[in-house]
Image (cartoon, helix red, strand yellow):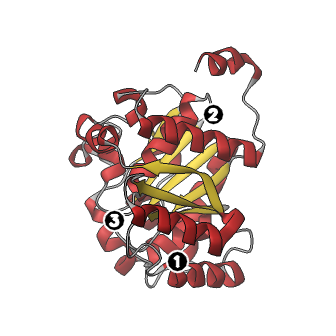
Amino acid sequence: MGKIIAVANQKGGVGKTTTSINLAASLAALDYRTLLVDADPQANATSGVGYDPKDIQNSIYECMVDGINPHDIIVPTNILPHLDLMPSHIDLVGAEVEMINLPNREEKMKEALRPLAEQYDFIIIDCSPSLGLITVNALTAAHSVIIPVQCEYFALEGLGKLLNTIKIIQSRLNIELEIEGILLTMYDVRLRLSNQVVEEVRMHFQQLAFDTIIPRNVKLSESPSFGIPAILHDAESKGSISYLNLAREIVEKNTVEARPEETAEDERI
């Protein structure tokens, strides 16, 4: 049974999509069967792995609203052999309104993704920057959630609200949901403020914070324009190495073992 991990924070610009793309790609590079789910109407995760959202015929929208079989929506990324995509489309903006009168509307994504967990080692969900119905669906479907927090002045703003939302979902919709970890992003070692944020997060959240910290990195910013993850744009960049370290940290935490026939490939990476 694979692990479903949502990447969520209602605050925009914290690195959710960057984390979703590069974590999924890093897990795939380590030979874990990985599905990247784009649950954001902006569809940046879709374009970030080489697909033009305008060319998408069926997306997660049709899966949640129209009940289309999720297997018919998944497409290979063609950039990494173990990485598949469940794409998004701008139509997802209207999904929250259309789902209001549907029975069990908070569980539509869970109905689509939970059966897929048997086919993948990891399913990574890129959430939209809100706490609306689509994000609630993602958290209801997930086994755990990664919370990206940027190393800037307003870093902890709204984090309490998100944690409260997670508690509500844990009590009412998904008792399995746990916090995979708080991920510090956009870290600049030269700035005193970045170091203060790191200290504050580690002091308040202790073991919830990942050991891996994601630095500000030009290659991470450039790679989406090429439609590839940073690991394929520049595998030796600090950003690529950091996300590989994050992937290894998550694998170690979840004690998921690679398939035996792929161990040699893993060692080469």
For badge 3, the amino acid type reads Leu
Report which residue position mark 2 lands on.
32
Q: Tell me the CA gap for discs 3 and 1.
A: 14 Å
4 in relation to 55, above or below = below
Q: Quadrant of residue 166 in the image?
A: bottom right
Q: Residue at x 72, y 17 (%)?
A: 261
Q: Residue at x 46, y 70 (%)?
A: 9
Q: Earlier in the sequence, mark 1 or mark 2?
A: 2
Residue 23's spot in the image, x, y percent? 51, 44
Report which residue position mark 3 lands on.
92
Q: Earlier in the sequence, mark 3 or mark 1?
A: 3
97 in relation to 43, above or below = below
Residue 123's spot in the image, x, y percent? 58, 48
Q: Residue at x 63, y 85 (%)?
A: 168
Q: Which residue is drawn at 36% across and 27% down?
A: 234
222 in relation to 216, above or below = above
Q: What element carries label 1?
A: helix
Report which residue position mark 1 lands on.
105
Residue 269's spot in the image, x, y percent? 58, 21
130 relative to 105 in the view: left or right: left
76 relative to 267 in the view: left or right: left
Q: Can residue 126 be seen in this view?
A: yes
Q: Is mark 3 on a helix, strand or loop?
A: helix
Front residue of this view, candidates 57 and 114: 114
